[in-house]
Amino acid sequence: MTDSTELNAKARELIPGGVNSPVRSCRSVGTEPLFIRQGYGSRIVTVEGKEMIDFVLSWGPLLLGHAHPEVLRAAHEALDRGSSFGAPCTGELDLAELIIDALPGVEMVRLVNSGTEASMSAIRAARAYTGRNKVLKFQGNYHGHVDSLLAQAGSGMATLSIPGTPGVPEDTVKDTLIAPYNDVQAVRDIFAEHGKDIAALILEPVAGNMGTVLPQAEFLSELRRITREYGAQLIFDEVITGFRVAYSGAQGYFGVTPDLTCLGKIIGGGFPVGAVGGHREIMEIFAPSGGVYQAGTLAGNPVAMASGAATLRTLARMDYAELERRTREFASELQQILSSQAGPIHLNCIGSLFTLFFTPDPVTDFASAQKTDTSLYGSFYRQMREYDIYLSPANFECTFTSFAHSDEDLHTALEAAKKVRL
Ligand code: KE4
């Protein structure tokens, strides 16, 4: 079998929906996934041998592009010494030190295997540290498939939650409170009512899971002030934004320091790595220094640590401002090209990530993001894929650039967009 169509058929026999993560299924853009054989720089190659310019980059981890030589070298050197020991290795110290040195809100860090584990552990630590149970999150924010965070606003009482998926008992989300993103007054009202019971407020400081949605002025600083006033822990889920919007993350970019930070994606350089970090007093709460149990067989895996450390060391030398300038210019030109066909399109862009919403109105929260015409996005996605441009197969995700994308790559993508008919 050398054809994605045949492989998809086989995959559906072996794996639910044929994929190991739902968004890869391309169902929301009306097509089937391509099987990928190889990646290098800004490019991926399908099993059919079709080379494409990649703007998904494994959903964010590959800010240096695919198969970066320094990352590959570090991973190969580590692998040659063995794949896993289940015992401390120096690579864990290397990666921990790089994260702590980069992020203002991180004095200590626990390395885990995914962003989901990071946010799950952060919530547990905040609850233990405060002795409280309630957690406030925002509509449209995704923090991994943590039961208590797979919640959606209940009808009517928008504050109270109902399970966001089958399999999560109502009891599991009874302590999960929900507010609209960017709605500071809603947060103030929730804290006025529940403040003494709220252990933590968790958010994506730049939302990436309803498409890219930016924090409005004072939103983050107000959340910092309110959580401090009520003694709740402020958790920044920087799984996407960490080392992406800036080397110092969104907390450095916006100058707001959280109590806890969740990380993933980039810090593994393409290997499964997550992390929860924060001020020393709360981090010491994790076993075995404290009583909060948290564990993982492959946490701190030496090959993943080597890949992550090589990635961060290389990123520390890169010009983020220049990449943001190039990305903003590219995304704006894309917006103009498509608007000439589909009418006004709204663009949200920061750092090296952006989302085009097929709606003329500003997108500042989940409700406004829902106004995007996802069928138009699907048509855009399918046509661009025909022109060998590989975009996020879902409108409620981010499109990513990398330090591996050349001006020629971006020009090629713009020329392809000119051929799209919406
Ligand atoms: P993982 O468990 O997938 O490593 O991380 C979960 C997670 C946590 N927090 C944020 C802000 C995230 O964006 C994610 C995962 N992002 C998704 C899509 N945006 C990854 C792609 C997928 O689910 O396949």
Image (cartoon, grey):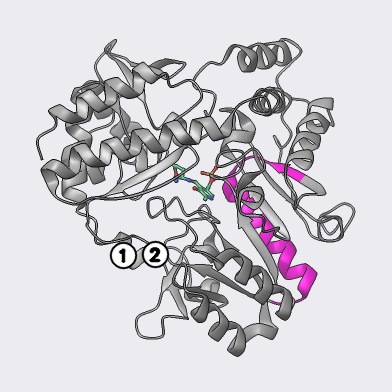
* Label 2 sits on residue: 365
x, y percent for residue 46: 32, 17
- Residue at image position (68%, 58%) is 122
Q: CA distance from mark 1 to mark 2?
A: 6 Å
Q: Please give the range of residues in magenta.
A: 110-132
Main secondary structure along the magenta-highlighted residues: helix
The answer to whether residue 421 is left or right of residue 144 is left
Choose top left, top right, bottom left or bottom right for residue 249. top right
* Label 1 sits on residue: 368
| Nearer to the camera, 151 or 399 | 399
> Would you place residue 43 above or below residue 342 in this image?
above
Q: Is residue 54 visible?
A: yes
> Would you place residue 1 above or below residue 55 in this image?
above
Count of numbered circles in the view: 2
> Would you place residue 291 above or below residue 65 in this image?
below
Q: Is residue 124 magenta?
A: yes
x, y percent for residue 324: 49, 36
What is the three-letter code of the residue carrying label 2?
Asp
Say few, some or many: other residues with alpha carbon within 10 Å of mark 1 (under 14 / 14 to 19 / 20 or more).
Answer: some
- Report helix, strand or loop for mark 1: helix
Disc on res. 123: none
Q: Is residue 400 visible?
A: no
Q: Quadrant of the N terminus?
A: top left
Question: Mark 1 near mark 2, Cβ–Cβ under 8 Å?
Answer: yes
| Nearer to the camera, 284 or 56 | 56
- Report helix, strand or loop for mark 2: loop
